[in-house]
Image: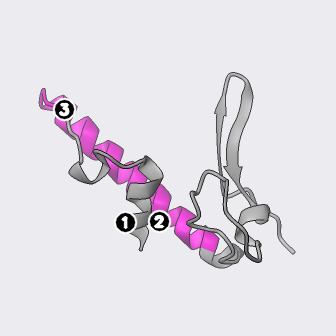
């Protein structure tokens, strides 16, 4: 079995959250990792695809924000206005 950490985020205190084999290899239960359930129980191959799509969507989102700032404005995507970033990305990858 391949054990892969698909995504993680860090602060000055160290690792604050991650998505790994505990999530994508789960057989039920509730997901409490940073993917918000996107990769829960789907297997490593599907989870890698989901995470790749997620990363591409995050990059596109922030690229749009940078383009708006360059033009002197602020970009706020309406789909993320009242959602967490992972809630928005779950909609993008669905």
Q: Over which residues does the magenta segment extend?
A: 47-74
Residue at 18% across / 30% down in the picture?
A: 70
- Between the C-alphas of marks 3 and 2, the distance is 25 Å
* Label 3 Cα neighbours within 10 Å, binned few <14 / some 14-19 / many ≥20: few
Q: Is residue 93 above or below residue 81?
A: below
Residue at 82% across / 65% down in the picture?
A: 3
Q: Position of residue 4 (x, y in %)?
A: 76, 62
* Label 1 Cα neighbours within 10 Å, binned few <14 / some 14-19 / many ≥20: few
Residue at 41% across / 74% down in the picture?
A: 94
Labels 3 and 2: the sequence-earlier one: 2
Asked if marks 1 and 2 touch (Cβ < 8 Å), the reply is yes
Q: Is residue 59 above or below residue 48?
A: above
Q: Is residue 1 left or right of residue 87?
A: right
Q: Position of residue 50 (x, y in %)?
A: 54, 69
Residue that label 2 marks = 53
SS at circle 3: loop
Residue at 77% across / 77% down in the picture?
A: 27
Q: Is residue 76 left or right of residue 60?
A: left
Residue that label 1 marks = 92
């Amino acid at each position: 079995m391949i054990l892969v950490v698909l995504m993680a985020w860090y602060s000055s205190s160290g690792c604050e959250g991650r998505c790994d084999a505990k999530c994508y290899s789960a057989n039920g239960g509730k997901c409490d990792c940073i993917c918000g359930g996107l990769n829960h129980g789907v297997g490593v191959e599907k989870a890698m695809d989901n995470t790749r799509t997620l990363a591409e969507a995050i990059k596109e989102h922030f690229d749009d924000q940078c383009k708006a700032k360059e033009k002197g404005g602020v970009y706020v995507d309406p789909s993320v206005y009242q959602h967490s970033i992972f809630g928005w990305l779950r909609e993008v990858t669905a």
